Amino acid sequence: MQQPVAVLRSALSGKEQMQASHPERRKVSLDVSALARGRIGGGYMDMLGRLLMGGIHAVRLYSWSPNWHLDAEPQPGFNWLSMTLTATATVDAATGMGAYRVTNLPPGYPLICPGERFTVGGIVWQAVNMAVADDAGIALIRVIGTPALSGTLSLDGQESAAFRPDGGIPVGDQAVGADWTYSWTFTEVFADEVGGFVEIDPWT
C-alpha cells in the first residue's frame, strides 16, 4: 500500500503535522510462471504485455489469500456453503476494534484466518484475527475500521482494482528444459485519473 503524505511544519509552534497528499493506492509485484495453467502462462504474459503497450491501458487484478491455499480452504466436517451465516456488526469489548459477530457455528470451528477476505452487505473486509467459534458456537471476526452494516457473511470475498505496469513490460527469457518467469510490478490507477474505464475481457 502506497500512502503519500505531506509533512507540514507550523511556523508558530515548530511542530510537524502529517496529512494525506493523495489517496492510498496499492502496489503489486508478481512473478508468473511461464508453465502455469497447463504450460500456457508464457503465452498469456506475452499477450498481456502487447495489450498494455501504448496509450493508457491497465489490467484488472483480483486479490488472493495471503495464506497457504490449503490452510485457507474451509475446514472438513462443516460446509458453510450449505447454510446462511449472519454477521452482526459490533465492537470488540476487549480491544475496542470493529468486529463482526457470527453465531450458529460448531464449537471450536476455525471460521477464518488472519488476512482472509470476506464480505458483508457487499463490502469487502479482511480478518485481523484467527476467528474460532467458542463453546456457544460464536466467533468474533475483528476488522480494521468500523462496520455499520450487518448481513449475510460470504467467505469468498475478493477485492479488485485496475493497475498499470511500472518499469516497462517484462520479457520472459526461456530456459532450456526448465520453467521461466515474467516479473511484473503494478501501481493502482483510479478511474477519475484517466477519464473512466472501458473494460473488455480478451481471454474468454
Image (cartoon, grey):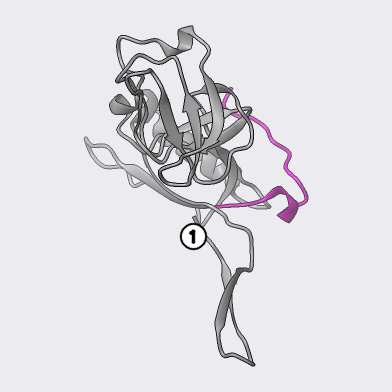
Residue drawn at 73 percent across, 39 percent down: 198
| Residue 165 visible, this angle | yes
Residue 142: x and y in percent read 45, 38
Residue 56 vs 78, above or below: the answer is: below
Residue drawn at 32 percent across, 19 percent down: 135
Query: Magenta region, mostly helix, strand or loop?
Result: loop
Left or right, 182 with respect to 189, comes to left
Q: Residue furthest top?
A: 82
Q: Residue furthest left?
A: 177
Amino acid on which the number 1 mark rests in the picture: Gly
| Residue 171 visible, this angle | no
Q: Is residue 203 magenta?
A: yes
Q: Is residue 119 magenta?
A: no
Left or right, 26 with respect to 139, comes to right
Residue 193: x and y in percent read 72, 55
Range covered by the magenta-colored residues: 187-204
- Figure quadrant of residue 130: top left
Circle 1 residue: 167
- Figure quadrant of residue 7: bottom right
- Helix, strand or loop at label 1? It is loop
| Near-viewer residue (47 or 192) | 192
Dot 1, crowdedness within 10 Å: few (<14), some or many (≥20)? few
| Near-viewer residue (95 or 176) | 95
Residue 180 vs 84, above or below: the answer is: below
Residue 177: x and y in percent read 21, 35
| Near-viewer residue (123 or 110) | 110
Residue 97: x and y in percent read 48, 45
Instruction: Count all numbered tags in the image, as a single digit.
Output: 1
Quadrant for the C terminus in the image: top right
